[in-house]
Amino acid sequence: MTEYAWPAVLRPSRLSFYLQHNTLRFASPITRVTQVMRREGARWMAEATFDPLDRVRAGVLEGLLAALAGSVNTVRVWDWRREYRTGDPRSQGDVPTGPYSFSDATIFTDGTGLVVGSGNPSLAAGAARGALSIQAQGFWPGTVAVGAGDYFGLNGRLHMATAAVTASGTGTATIPIGPPLRAAAAVSEPLVLTQPTVAMRLVSDDEAINPTRPGRFTAITIRLEESL
């Protein structure tokens, strides 16, 4: 299997991008009381329409679809609606690492101090498989670390913050996530917060259907599912 990068020249004109959960439901035929169980296997789904495409961009997309060979190979895709987090874009990696001192040994007298850098956002503690929250560090202190619906990448997988979280005074944050972690993650594992991607494959062998309109403009709609 080969994994491809998404061509930068291609942006969809319409997009559906969502998390498809995997649940088991049982409803009592007598009382209609419903029991629901979460199962592993939640996956990201996407449907992207490219319309219109000129000859050059149509060629780029059709070449990619040919290389994907139906569902054989994968491509790294992100949600074009939210490529960047809505939280404060700064991180503690934006300032030099401490400690700081003054040459005349003076100190702050109003109780404030300098922000000491601790790197870019990463896991502050290890997380077990199936975890629905992570402890992260490296955010700008006292600001919104991630907003509800913000994406981030971890261990090559795509996750979403399910609620807005404000970083502590030391830049740490506990982030509720979906879907649950599919594998244990180690402390200091970096978070990808800009255009985090997910490996996806074509849903069927017919995704390259390409109706062409007068004027030689092509329209292509493709359906993708996360490669688990």
Image (spheres, rainbow, N blue to C red):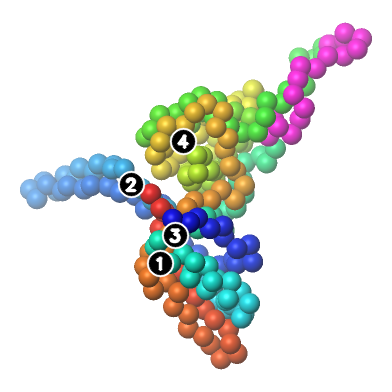
Image mark for residue 46: none
Q: Earlier in the sequence, mark 2 or mark 3?
A: 2
Magenta-drawn segment = 91-107
Which residue position is annotated with label 3?
73
Which residue position is annotated with label 1?
70
**Mark nearer the viewer, 2 or 3:** 3
- When the figure is inspected, residue 216 is found, relative to residue 24, above or below; the finding is below
Q: Magenta stretch: residue 144 in it?
A: no
Image position of 91 (left or right of 14): right
- Position of the N terminus, as image quadrant, is bottom left
Mark 4 residue element:
strand
Q: In the rendered structure, which amino acid carries the disc numbered 1?
A: Gly
> 196 or 151, which lies in front?
196
Q: Are marks 3 and 1 in contact (CB under 8 Å)?
A: no
The percent position of residue 104, horizontal first and vertical second, equals 92, 9
Which residue position is annotated with label 2?
41
**Mark nearer the viewer, 4 or 1:** 1
Number of residues whose C-alpha sits closer than 10 Å to that of mark 1, classed few (under 14), some (14–19) or many (20 or more): some
